[in-house]
């Protein structure tokens, strides 16, 4: 058997590929057997047992090392001043939501308790007592490097599991984010909710730092302290059971000894209060039961869920006031997620069908050459971003309903990688001769080089291929687009950068307009593809940035209307190029445009005839009949009372529409425009005499 030629790529054995994927599967699914992680988990279990045993012994009055610490004497007075208590409600007319599980968003305002000039007058004397003994050097160290002064928003993700210890005291935990325009700071949130009064008391530590929930009972009112202690004891037991299950299953979700937030060490106490709903308590409980366990009964309309709160850090001299924090119950949120996933899947399926039908008409080089590759590149980038965001949302969120988000993500991936890349590759292949110049022919008599090219060594073969790919113009383009995609992923927390990126990506028809101008092409893409794709993509933009309760909890942004308007303008230009010519919007003399052949000259010799017969089509052999519309709006009458659609007062669009019914080639053959369009998708030559034809 002949040996394989040197320098030629060899087929890789399928065994190596199978082993590679088997290794990846093993590394991603095997239990965590890291000895260090196991030791850390064992230490955490021992610490949790010690905390639970000491606290339980202290509650029972037996020997214990635990002593309950009283809060700062000025902490509660400041909270009461900033957040006055509401009067008792009448259950016949008002009520509070009994469960706060859900997602919450609102505005936040920072106060420096050390600067009395920036505080409300009623706060100043109490804040002075709170900070008078603080060491400013220590305060600066705790505050850290994070930019506190730019805080503008806050968001909560809270969970309130059912508690059977005492129905009047419910544990609540989750996360709280303090947000600026470009960054956010995450905190662990652990507290107690009192459904009968609508009050919330919580402690917060930077994310990764465990919260000692034994400090919660001293913060609550005297009448609730004893019940709160037993609720805290039950929560300590649940934490111990959770750690034990992690050890049994051989995995560790968190490392409590290594906090991942080193920007600050400020600890906060949170005081909040739900606003009462103007509905009877019995009606609201019926609504909550129906939302949790749907039976189809008729209930009241959902009243808004709003609360006010304040964060106070005595050690950092910081207070953050929160007003009108609006919430969405988690059961309602997941129903919205499922609904959105279904509708988004229909949108991406519609985009897929439109693209497939467009590809059916551009299977040949003649049909592909008028199309701009950049229109598909922009759409592929948008759909790649959609695939990433949908899939991450569906996999990382711990809820069965979120798995439905994988469906639109999968369709976006198929749309980007298998369909939008295909016409882009074909367009690139057909436009490469336009972008490259032919190599000069060798001189006559010149002898070929006697030195053969050196074969690269196996060691540097990979680097050589990478270098060759980056040296290619297409390689540099894709590298630039990949870096742009990564930049957008990293900058999604900035609304300004996100809207700029959306505006750039939704300029997808601009490259096609420019290519129509450069080639003199009237109709490169189908109208249904352009219009349908534009409408579907505009719907997604409007949902994310106009709908106030979108599943991503994004704030409404009026610039979304500008993006939709920009899409509509691009579509109008594309349709105008089809009916009025590729250069209809460019004043003469502004730029040098290529000479474009007009396939639709005025061949109607008798404008008074009810119809014009221009002969037989050279393709379908049917008569070419140009019919006039009867008295169209905007036409003018001649002296004998006939309507003259070709007169000086006729509409320009009507004139162009009538002339587009036929096409007259440079070689003097006439045929239906539709017939010639279908013919030129296959061959760019005259069907009668085989003469090369210019773009239609």
Image (spheres, rainbow, N blue to C red):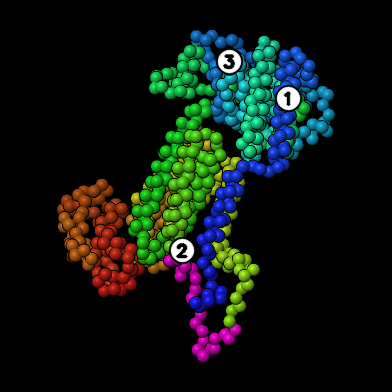
Q: Nearer the viewer, mark 2 or mark 1?
A: 1
Which element is circle 3 on? loop
The Cα atoms of the two marked residues, 2 and 3, are separated by 67 Å
Q: Disc 2, disc 3: CB below 8 Å?
A: no
Q: Nearer the viewer, mark 3 or mark 1?
A: 1
Residue 692 in the image: above or below residue 180: below
Q: Residue at x 40, y 46 (%)?
A: 349
What residue sits right under mark 1 in the picture?
A: 51
Residue 423 in the image: above or below residue 171: below
Q: Residue at x 60, y 66 (%)?
A: 462
Q: Position of residue 204 (x, y in %)?
A: 68, 28
Residue 268 in the image: above or below residue 590: above
Which element is circle 1 on? helix
Magenta-colored span: 429-451
Local packing at callout 2 (Cα closer than 10 Å; few below 14, some 14-19, many 20+) is many
Q: Position of residue 675 (x, y in %)?
A: 26, 62
Q: Position of residue 20 (x, y in %)?
A: 57, 56
Q: Residue at x 46, y 52 (%)?
A: 416
| Residue 617 in which image quadrant | bottom left
Residue 428 - label? 2
List the single residue furthest toward the bottom.
445
What residue sits right under mark 3 in the picture?
A: 167
| Residue 59 in which image quadrant | top right
């Amino acid at each position: 058997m002949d040996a394989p030629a040197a320098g030629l790529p060899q087929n890789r054995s399928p065994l190596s590929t199978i082993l590679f994927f088997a290794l990846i599967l093993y590394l991603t699914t095997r239990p965590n057997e890291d000895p260090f992680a196991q030791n850390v988990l064992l230490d955490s279990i021992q610490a949790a047992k010690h905390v639970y045993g000491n606290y339980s012994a202290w509650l029972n009055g037996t020997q214990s090392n635990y002593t309950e610490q009283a809060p700062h004497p000025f902490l509660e007075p400041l909270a009461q001043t900033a957040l006055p208590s509401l009067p008792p409600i009448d259950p016949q007319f008002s009520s509070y939501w009994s469960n706060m599980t859900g997602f919450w968003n609102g505005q936040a305002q920072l106060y420096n308790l050390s600067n009395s000039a920036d505080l409300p007058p009623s706060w100043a004397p109490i804040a002075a007592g709170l900070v008078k003994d603080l060491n400013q050097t220590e305060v600066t160290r705790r505050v850290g490097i994070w930019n506190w002064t730019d805080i503008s928003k806050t968001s909560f993700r809270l969970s309130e599991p059912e508690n059977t210890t005492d129905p009047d005291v419910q544990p609540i935990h989750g996360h709280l984010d303090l947000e600026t325009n470009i960054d956010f700071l995450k905190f662990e949130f652990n507290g107690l909710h009192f459904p009968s009064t609508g009050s919330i008391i919580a402690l917060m530590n930077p994310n990764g730092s465990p919260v000692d929930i034994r400090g919660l009972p001293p913060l609550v009112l005297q009448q609730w302290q004893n019940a709160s202690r037993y609720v805290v004891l039950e929560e300590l037991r649940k934490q111990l059971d959770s750690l034990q299950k992690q050890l049994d299953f051989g995995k560790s979700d968190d490392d409590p000894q290594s906090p991942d937030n080193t920007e600050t060490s400020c600890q906060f106490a949170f005081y909040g209060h739900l606003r009462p709903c103007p509905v009877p308590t019995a009606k609201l409980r019926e609504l909550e039961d129906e939302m949790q366990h749907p039976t189809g009964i008729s209930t009241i309309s959902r009243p808004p869920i709003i609360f006010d709160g304040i964060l106070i850090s005595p050690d950092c001299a910081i207070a953050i006031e929160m007003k009108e924090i609006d919430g969405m119950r988690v059961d309602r949120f997941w129903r919205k997620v499922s609904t959105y996933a279904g509708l988004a899947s229909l949108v991406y399926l519609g985009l897929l069908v439109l693209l497939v039908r467009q590809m059916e008409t551009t299977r040949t080089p003649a049909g592909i050459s008028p199309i701009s590759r950049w229109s598909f590149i922009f759409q592929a980038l948008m759909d790649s971003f959609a695939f990433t965001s949908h899939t991450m949302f569906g996999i990382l969120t711990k809820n069965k309903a979120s798995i439905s988000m994988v469906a639109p993500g999968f369709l976006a991936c198929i749309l980007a990688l298998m369909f939008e890349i295909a016409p882009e590759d074909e367009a690139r292949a057909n436009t490469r001769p336009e972008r490259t110049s032919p190599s000069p022919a060798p001189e006559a008599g010149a002898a070929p080089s006697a030195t053969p090219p050196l074969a690269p060594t196996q060691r540097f073969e990979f680097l050589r291929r990478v270098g060759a790919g980056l040296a290619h113009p297409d390689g540099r383009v894709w590298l630039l687009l990949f870096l742009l995609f990564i930049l957008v992923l990293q900058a999604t927390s900035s609304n300004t950068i996100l809207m700029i990126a959306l505006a750039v990506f939704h300029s997808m028809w601009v490259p096609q307009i420019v290519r129509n101008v450069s080639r003199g092409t009237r109709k490169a893409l189908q109208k249904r593809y352009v219009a349908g794709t534009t409408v579907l993509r505009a719907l997604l933009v409007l949902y994310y940035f106009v709908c106030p309760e979108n599943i991503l909890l994004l704030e409404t942004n009026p610039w979304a209307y500008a993006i939709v308007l920009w899409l509509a303008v691009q579509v109008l230009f594309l349709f105008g190029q089809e009916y009025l010519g590729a250069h209809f919007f460019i004043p003469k003399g502004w730029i040098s445009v290529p000479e474009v052949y007009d396939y639709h000259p005025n061949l109607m010799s008798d404008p008074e005839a009810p119809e014009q017969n221009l002969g037989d089509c050279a393709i379908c052999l049917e008569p070419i009949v140009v019919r006039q519309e009867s008295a169209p709006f905007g036409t003018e009458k001649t002296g004998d009372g006939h309507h003259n659609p070709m007169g000086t007062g006729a509409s320009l669009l009507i004139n162009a529409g009538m002339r587009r019914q036929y096409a007259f080639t440079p070689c003097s053959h006439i045929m239906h425009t539709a017939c010639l369009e279908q013919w030129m998708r296959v061959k760019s030559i005259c069907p009668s005499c085989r003469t090369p034809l210019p773009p239609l």
